[in-house]
Protein backbone atom coordinates (compact mmCIF):
# COMPACT_ATOMS: atom_id res chain seq x y z
CA UNK A 1 0.00 0.00 0.00
CA UNK A 2 2.49 2.55 -1.23
CA UNK A 3 0.07 5.48 -0.99
CA UNK A 4 -0.57 4.94 2.74
CA UNK A 5 1.46 7.04 5.15
CA UNK A 6 2.58 5.94 8.61
CA UNK A 7 0.04 8.38 10.06
CA UNK A 8 -2.73 6.77 8.02
CA UNK A 9 -1.67 3.33 9.25
CA UNK A 10 -1.75 4.43 12.89
CA UNK A 11 -5.10 6.13 12.44
CA UNK A 12 -6.45 2.88 11.04
CA UNK A 13 -4.86 0.99 13.89
CA UNK A 14 -6.53 3.34 16.35
CA UNK A 15 -9.93 2.43 14.90
CA UNK A 16 -9.25 -1.25 15.51
CA UNK A 17 -7.75 -0.65 18.92
CA UNK A 18 -11.01 0.97 19.88
CA UNK A 19 -12.66 -2.32 19.01
CA UNK A 20 -10.36 -3.98 21.53
CA UNK A 21 -8.27 -6.12 19.21
CA UNK A 22 -4.84 -4.50 18.87
CA UNK A 23 -1.86 -5.07 21.15
CA UNK A 24 -0.78 -1.91 22.91
CA UNK A 25 2.66 -2.08 21.31
CA UNK A 26 1.08 -1.20 17.95
CA UNK A 27 -0.21 2.05 19.40
CA UNK A 28 2.86 2.84 21.48
CA UNK A 29 5.30 2.98 18.58
CA UNK A 30 6.67 -0.48 19.35
CA UNK A 31 5.40 -2.08 16.18
CA UNK A 32 3.61 -0.22 13.41
CA UNK A 33 2.90 -3.23 11.22
CA UNK A 34 1.17 -6.29 12.61
CA UNK A 35 0.64 -9.74 11.15
CA UNK A 36 -2.84 -11.19 11.53
CA UNK A 37 -3.58 -14.82 10.68
CA UNK A 38 -7.17 -15.93 10.18
CA UNK A 39 -7.19 -19.72 10.28
CA UNK A 40 -10.12 -21.70 8.86
CA UNK A 41 -10.82 -25.29 8.00
CA UNK A 42 -12.06 -24.66 4.45
CA UNK A 43 -11.92 -22.05 1.71
CA UNK A 44 -14.62 -19.51 2.72
CA UNK A 45 -14.30 -19.98 6.51
CA UNK A 46 -11.89 -17.07 7.13
CA UNK A 47 -13.83 -14.84 4.72
CA UNK A 48 -17.30 -15.57 6.08
CA UNK A 49 -16.28 -15.33 9.73
CA UNK A 50 -13.80 -12.45 9.70
CA UNK A 51 -13.74 -10.93 6.22
CA UNK A 52 -14.70 -7.46 7.39
CA UNK A 53 -11.99 -7.46 10.05
CA UNK A 54 -9.44 -8.80 7.58
CA UNK A 55 -10.22 -5.93 5.19
CA UNK A 56 -9.91 -3.35 7.99
CA UNK A 57 -6.49 -4.61 9.02
CA UNK A 58 -5.26 -4.81 5.43
CA UNK A 59 -6.49 -1.28 4.70
CA UNK A 60 -4.66 -0.05 7.80
CA UNK A 61 -1.39 -1.34 6.34
CA UNK A 62 -1.05 -4.56 8.31
CA UNK A 63 -0.23 -7.99 6.87
CA UNK A 64 -3.19 -10.36 6.72
CA UNK A 65 -2.79 -14.10 6.13
CA UNK A 66 -5.68 -16.43 5.36
CA UNK A 67 -4.68 -19.90 6.52
CA UNK A 68 -6.71 -22.83 5.19
CA UNK A 69 -6.56 -26.32 6.69
CA UNK A 70 -7.90 -27.94 3.49
CA UNK A 71 -8.68 -27.02 -0.09
CA UNK A 72 -12.35 -27.98 0.19
CA UNK A 73 -11.87 -31.34 -1.52
CA UNK A 74 -15.23 -32.76 -0.43
CA UNK A 75 -17.17 -29.56 -0.95
CA UNK A 76 -18.63 -29.87 -4.46
CA UNK A 77 -21.18 -32.56 -5.14
CA UNK A 78 -20.38 -34.63 -8.22
CA UNK A 79 -16.74 -33.50 -8.38
CA UNK A 80 -13.70 -35.56 -7.49
CA UNK A 81 -11.50 -34.37 -4.67
CA UNK A 82 -8.92 -33.20 -7.17
CA UNK A 83 -11.47 -31.28 -9.26
CA UNK A 84 -13.10 -29.68 -6.22
CA UNK A 85 -9.75 -28.69 -4.73
CA UNK A 86 -8.76 -26.92 -7.94
CA UNK A 87 -12.03 -25.00 -8.11
CA UNK A 88 -12.15 -24.06 -4.45
CA UNK A 89 -8.48 -23.07 -4.33
CA UNK A 90 -9.09 -20.64 -7.18
CA UNK A 91 -12.10 -19.24 -5.31
CA UNK A 92 -10.02 -18.77 -2.16
CA UNK A 93 -7.32 -16.95 -4.11
CA UNK A 94 -9.90 -14.55 -5.53
CA UNK A 95 -11.40 -13.95 -2.09
CA UNK A 96 -7.95 -13.19 -0.72
CA UNK A 97 -7.33 -10.75 -3.57
CA UNK A 98 -10.50 -8.89 -2.65
CA UNK A 99 -9.55 -8.73 1.03
CA UNK A 100 -5.84 -8.01 0.33
CA UNK A 101 -4.83 -11.14 2.22
CA UNK A 102 -2.10 -13.69 1.50
CA UNK A 103 -3.34 -17.29 1.23
CA UNK A 104 -1.51 -20.18 2.91
CA UNK A 105 -2.66 -23.81 2.76
CA UNK A 106 -2.01 -26.73 5.09
CA UNK A 107 -2.25 -30.21 3.59
CA UNK A 108 -5.24 -31.88 5.21
CA UNK A 109 -8.24 -33.23 3.27
CA UNK A 110 -11.74 -31.82 3.62
CA UNK A 111 -13.94 -34.24 5.54
CA UNK A 112 -11.00 -36.43 6.58
CA UNK A 113 -9.08 -34.07 8.83
CA UNK A 114 -7.22 -35.56 11.76
CA UNK A 115 -5.38 -34.79 14.96
CA UNK A 116 -2.08 -36.53 15.58
CA UNK A 117 1.54 -35.67 16.23
CA UNK A 118 2.36 -35.16 12.57
CA UNK A 119 -0.57 -32.79 12.04
CA UNK A 120 0.22 -30.80 15.16
CA UNK A 121 3.80 -30.43 13.95
CA UNK A 122 2.72 -29.32 10.48
CA UNK A 123 0.52 -26.58 11.93
CA UNK A 124 3.22 -25.48 14.36
CA UNK A 125 5.83 -25.23 11.61
CA UNK A 126 3.64 -22.80 9.67
CA UNK A 127 2.67 -20.67 12.67
CA UNK A 128 6.26 -20.58 13.92
CA UNK A 129 7.49 -19.37 10.52
CA UNK A 130 4.69 -16.82 10.11
CA UNK A 131 5.06 -15.49 13.68
CA UNK A 132 1.67 -13.75 13.95
CA UNK A 133 0.80 -11.00 16.38
CA UNK A 134 -2.87 -11.97 16.35
CA UNK A 135 -4.50 -15.26 15.37
CA UNK A 136 -8.23 -15.73 14.78
CA UNK A 137 -9.68 -19.22 14.45
CA UNK A 138 -12.78 -21.37 14.92
CA UNK A 139 -14.54 -21.52 18.27
CA UNK A 140 -14.04 -25.17 19.33
CA UNK A 141 -17.69 -25.88 20.18
CA UNK A 142 -18.82 -26.42 16.61
CA UNK A 143 -20.92 -28.97 14.78
CA UNK A 144 -18.34 -29.45 12.01
CA UNK A 145 -15.48 -31.80 12.81
CA UNK A 146 -13.04 -29.98 10.54
CA UNK A 147 -13.75 -26.73 12.38
CA UNK A 148 -13.10 -28.36 15.75
CA UNK A 149 -9.84 -29.86 14.52
CA UNK A 150 -8.54 -26.56 13.12
CA UNK A 151 -9.41 -24.88 16.41
CA UNK A 152 -7.43 -27.42 18.42
CA UNK A 153 -4.47 -27.28 16.03
CA UNK A 154 -4.29 -23.51 16.41
CA UNK A 155 -4.73 -23.68 20.17
CA UNK A 156 -1.79 -26.08 20.30
CA UNK A 157 0.40 -23.67 18.32
CA UNK A 158 -0.51 -20.90 20.76
CA UNK A 159 0.63 -23.07 23.66
CA UNK A 160 3.83 -24.04 21.85
CA UNK A 161 4.50 -20.37 21.15
CA UNK A 162 4.19 -19.78 24.91
CA UNK A 163 1.12 -17.63 24.31
CA UNK A 164 3.17 -14.91 22.64
CA UNK A 165 0.48 -13.95 20.14
CA UNK A 166 -3.09 -12.86 20.75
CA UNK A 167 -5.64 -15.67 20.33
CA UNK A 168 -9.23 -14.94 19.37
CA UNK A 169 -12.07 -17.22 18.29
CA UNK A 170 -14.67 -16.45 15.63
CA UNK A 171 -18.05 -17.88 14.68
CA UNK A 172 -19.34 -19.53 11.51
CA UNK A 173 -23.02 -20.16 10.84
CA UNK A 174 -23.86 -19.71 14.50
CA UNK A 175 -26.61 -21.97 15.77
CA UNK A 176 -26.04 -24.42 12.92
CA UNK A 177 -22.28 -24.85 13.32
CA UNK A 178 -20.80 -22.60 16.01
CA UNK A 179 -22.65 -23.00 19.32
CA UNK A 180 -22.61 -21.33 22.76
CA UNK A 181 -20.77 -18.31 21.38
CA UNK A 182 -20.82 -15.07 23.36
CA UNK A 183 -18.46 -12.40 21.99
CA UNK A 184 -16.07 -10.56 24.27
CA UNK A 185 -15.04 -8.20 21.46
CA UNK A 186 -16.74 -6.62 18.46
CA UNK A 187 -15.26 -5.09 15.33
CA UNK A 188 -17.28 -2.52 13.42
CA UNK A 189 -17.27 -3.74 9.79
CA UNK A 190 -19.80 -1.22 8.49
CA UNK A 191 -17.24 0.23 6.07
CA UNK A 192 -15.98 -3.17 4.88
CA UNK A 193 -19.11 -5.33 4.86
CA UNK A 194 -19.39 -4.88 1.11
CA UNK A 195 -15.86 -6.25 0.61
CA UNK A 196 -16.61 -9.15 2.92
CA UNK A 197 -19.74 -9.92 0.91
CA UNK A 198 -17.80 -9.82 -2.37
CA UNK A 199 -15.12 -12.11 -0.94
CA UNK A 200 -17.78 -14.60 0.10
CA UNK A 201 -19.50 -14.34 -3.27
CA UNK A 202 -16.14 -15.32 -4.78
CA UNK A 203 -17.11 -18.87 -3.74
CA UNK A 204 -19.88 -19.64 -6.28
CA UNK A 205 -19.32 -23.38 -5.89
CA UNK A 206 -20.71 -23.00 -2.36
CA UNK A 207 -23.82 -21.08 -3.46
CA UNK A 208 -22.66 -18.26 -1.22
CA UNK A 209 -25.14 -15.65 -2.44
CA UNK A 210 -28.22 -17.71 -1.63
CA UNK A 211 -26.58 -20.06 0.86
CA UNK A 212 -24.12 -19.44 3.66
CA UNK A 213 -23.91 -15.66 3.28
CA UNK A 214 -27.61 -15.28 3.98
CA UNK A 215 -26.97 -16.54 7.50
CA UNK A 216 -23.75 -14.55 7.90
CA UNK A 217 -25.54 -11.39 6.82
CA UNK A 218 -28.00 -11.93 9.67
CA UNK A 219 -25.07 -12.54 12.02
CA UNK A 220 -23.32 -9.34 10.90
CA UNK A 221 -26.47 -7.34 11.54
CA UNK A 222 -27.24 -9.02 14.87
CA UNK A 223 -23.71 -8.52 16.22
CA UNK A 224 -23.98 -4.95 15.00
CA UNK A 225 -27.16 -4.48 17.02
CA UNK A 226 -25.46 -5.89 20.10
CA UNK A 227 -22.60 -3.41 19.73
CA UNK A 228 -24.64 -0.40 18.48
CA UNK A 229 -23.19 -0.59 14.97
CA UNK A 230 -24.70 -1.31 11.57
CA UNK A 231 -22.56 -4.40 10.94
CA UNK A 232 -20.12 -6.12 13.26
CA UNK A 233 -18.12 -9.31 13.69
CA UNK A 234 -17.92 -10.86 17.12
CA UNK A 235 -14.90 -12.58 18.67
CA UNK A 236 -14.00 -14.32 21.89
CA UNK A 237 -10.60 -13.48 23.33
CA UNK A 238 -8.79 -16.22 25.23
CA UNK A 239 -8.49 -14.80 28.74
CA UNK A 240 -4.81 -15.79 29.00
CA UNK A 241 -4.00 -14.23 25.66
CA UNK A 242 -1.01 -11.93 25.50
CA UNK A 243 -0.44 -8.65 27.29
CA UNK A 244 -1.56 -5.07 26.98
CA UNK A 245 -4.74 -5.31 24.91
CA UNK A 246 -6.58 -2.00 24.91
Image (tube, rainbow, N blue to C red):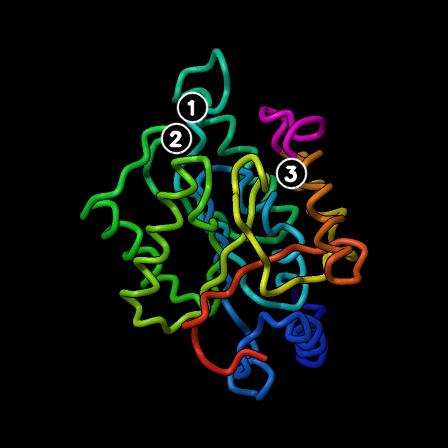
Rendered location of residue 123, percent (x, y): 31, 52
The answer to the question of whether label 2 and label 1 lie on touching residues, with beta carbons closer than 8 A, is: yes
Separation of marks 3 and 2 at Cα, in angstroms: 19 Å
Indicate the quadrant where residue 210 lies.
top right
Q: Which residue is mark 2?
A: 110
Quadrant assignment, res 17: bottom right
- Overall secondary structure of the magenta section: loop
Q: Is residue 161 above or below residue 127?
A: below
Which residue lies under the disc numbered 3? 200
Quadrant occupied by the C terminus: bottom right
Q: Which residues are magenta?
A: 203-212
Give yes or no for contact between labels 3 and 1 (Cβ–Cβ under 8 Å). no
- Mark-to-mark CA distance, 2 and 1: 5 Å
Q: Viewer-proximal residue, 223 or 164?
A: 223
Query: Which residue ends up furthest to the top in the rendered image?
Result: 78
Location of the N terminus (image quadrant): bottom right
Q: Position of residue 25 (x, y in %)?
A: 52, 83
Mark 3–mark 1 Cα distance, whole angstroms, equals 18 Å
Query: Which residue is found at the position 47% from the left and 53% from the top?
Result: 137
Q: Secondary structure at mark 3?
A: helix
Q: What residue is at 45 percent from the left and 70 percent from the top?
A: 239
Instruction: Identify the residue position indicated by label 1 in the image.
Output: 74
Of residue 80 and residue 102, the one placed in the foreground of this image is 80
28 shown above or below 87: below
- Give neighbour class at mark 1: few <14, some 14-19, many 20+ (Cα, 10 Å): many
Amino acid sequence: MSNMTRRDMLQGAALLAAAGMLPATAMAGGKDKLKIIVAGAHPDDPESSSGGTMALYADAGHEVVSLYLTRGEAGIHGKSHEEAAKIRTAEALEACRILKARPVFLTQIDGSTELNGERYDEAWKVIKEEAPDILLTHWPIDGHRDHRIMSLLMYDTWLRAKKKFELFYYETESGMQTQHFGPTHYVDITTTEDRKRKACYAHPSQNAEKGFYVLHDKMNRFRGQEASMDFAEGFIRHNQSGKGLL
